[in-house]
Amino acid sequence: MAVIFAMAGSAIGLGNIWRFPYIVGEHGGAAFVLIYIVSTLLISMPVFVAEVSVGRRSRTSAYGALGRLSPGKWIWKAMGLLTVFIPLMIASYYSVIGGWSVNYLIKACSLSFLSQSPDEVTGMFGTFISSSWTPLVFHMLFLAACCMVVAGGVKSGIEKFSKLTIPMLFVLVLVILVYSVTLPGASVGVNYLLKPDFSQLTPRTFAYALGQSFYSLSLGMGCIITYGSYVSSKENILASSAGTAVSDLLFAILAGFAIMPAVFAAGIEPGAGPGLIFQSIPFIFTKMGMQLPLVSTVVSVLFFLTIVVAAMTSCISLVEVGVAYLWDRYSIRRPVGSLIIFMLCGLAGVLCSLSFGPLSSLTVGGKCIFDLFDWFASNILLLLAAFAVVVFVGFVMKKEDVWDEVTNSGAFKVNVKLFNLLYFLIKWVAPVALTLIFITNFIY
Ligand code: PHE
């Protein structure tokens, strides 16, 4: 059961709180949210089931899973390697944002949103991320904390941590939501999320919605396969996948309603990009602080605490893929494996962190190193890896084996029609959708 908390912990993260609101803002609000919901239910959720099934059936980490289920085929081994590489790439820049969140948590605790004007607080973000040392130190601290939990093991480290933090996250986001929607001017933000404007839809909207949904559910990067390998043989895969997908979706929507009204109340552009929450939210806290300093301080601490905790449980799942690989492949023990991953991602993260400061002129195709890591991992590699998994489950694994996994060899009653629909979605709909997004990412 606890592994489900770990999966939800992996899914719920910066993708929901930091990425989702700004992508919604860049793609026109409610219409995007609708497409996001449909893609999650029709495509991402079946892919989630496919990844958990592959993990549990192979009982090995992402690296060896496909290879073990289809021995002797080099392509599945290669895909396995890809699913180890992607999370490491994501962990490198993800922990940079994790570091920003820790820094902002400390700012909230030390009342720095109260001692400056709202405009100074908004501007503070740019100054902070473009400095060299401070973001680096926080990036390392954040990554070290995640690696320590992973070194502690799956049961006593990851599962315990997630079991405690996931319910806490929901409570925290609800508190912030209530606060945010009652701000003056918040109703524009609420409407922005509720009233769809379909005239703004383009093929890119679909591509970003599905891409975001995959990212948010940690698909296509080995995390769910690896966690799937820890799922007990008694667990109902369908129920736990649906549970995780729905909680992640719910959390994203709650986060949207917690953040967008505040963005509008602050008069900030919803399409302001990655800095959105680090600029708009502190702005609100500063303004509120002028009248209600205590409330503002409490809510700001809770807000950044939510982000730090959510980011940690996700980053932990990224690190776990590498550590599980080192153990399965080279029998390297968890503490040493965690240290190796810490050094690798820490070093790559230095480049990502500095790409907002001293290395900002180093760009490829107009993208700095940080953006390049995010774009390449989430828009290219992730799609490839997810494609490999669905093709594997749809065309290489026998349909009876998938049925066997989903029903626990007949122990659970699963409606045959429902299963056939799920299988069809995995085998045909998901690969076609993934191919279309892949193409769209290049054309548009
Ligand atoms: N799903 C996580 C989030 O929403 C991010 C993540 C991506 C975690 C990939 C693991 C793997 O923030």
Image (cartoon, rainbow, N blue to C red):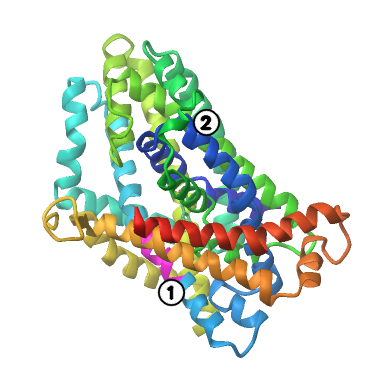
Coordinates of residue 4 in the picture (x, y in percent):
65, 52
Question: Does ligand 1 reach within 8 Å of label 1's beta carbon?
Answer: no
Choose top left, top right, bottom left or bottom right for residue 189.
Answer: top left
Crowding around mark 2 (Cα neighbors within 10 Å: few <14, some 14 to 19, many 20+) is some
Choose top left, top right, bottom left or bottom right for residue 441.
Answer: bottom left
Q: Which residue is mark 1?
A: 336
The magenta stretch spans which residues?
A: 84-92
Image position of 166 with respect to 257: above or below: below
Image position of 122 with respect to 245: above or below: above
Secondary structure of the residue carrying tag 2 is: helix
Point out which mark residue 254 bears: 2
Task: Please say whether residue 91 is one of the residues in the magenta stretch.
Answer: yes
Point out which mark residue 437 bears: none
**Magenta residues: mostly which secondary structure?**
helix
Q: Identity of the amino acid at label 2?
A: Leu
Q: CA distance from mark 1 to mark 2?
A: 38 Å
Residue at 37% x, 64% y: name it.
89
Q: Is residue 170 visible?
A: yes
Coordinates of residue 330 in the picture (x, y in percent):
49, 84
Q: Is residue 235 visible?
A: no
Residue at 71% x, 72% y: name it.
57
Secondary structure of the residue carrying tag 1 is: helix
Sequence-first disc among 1 and 2: 2
Image position of 370 with respect to 326: above or below: above
Crowding around mark 1 (Cα neighbors within 10 Å: few <14, some 14 to 19, many 20+) is some
- Total residue callouts: 2
Coordinates of residue 359 in the picture (x, y in percent):
13, 58
Q: Identity of the amino acid at label 1?
A: Val
Q: Residue furthest bottom?
A: 72
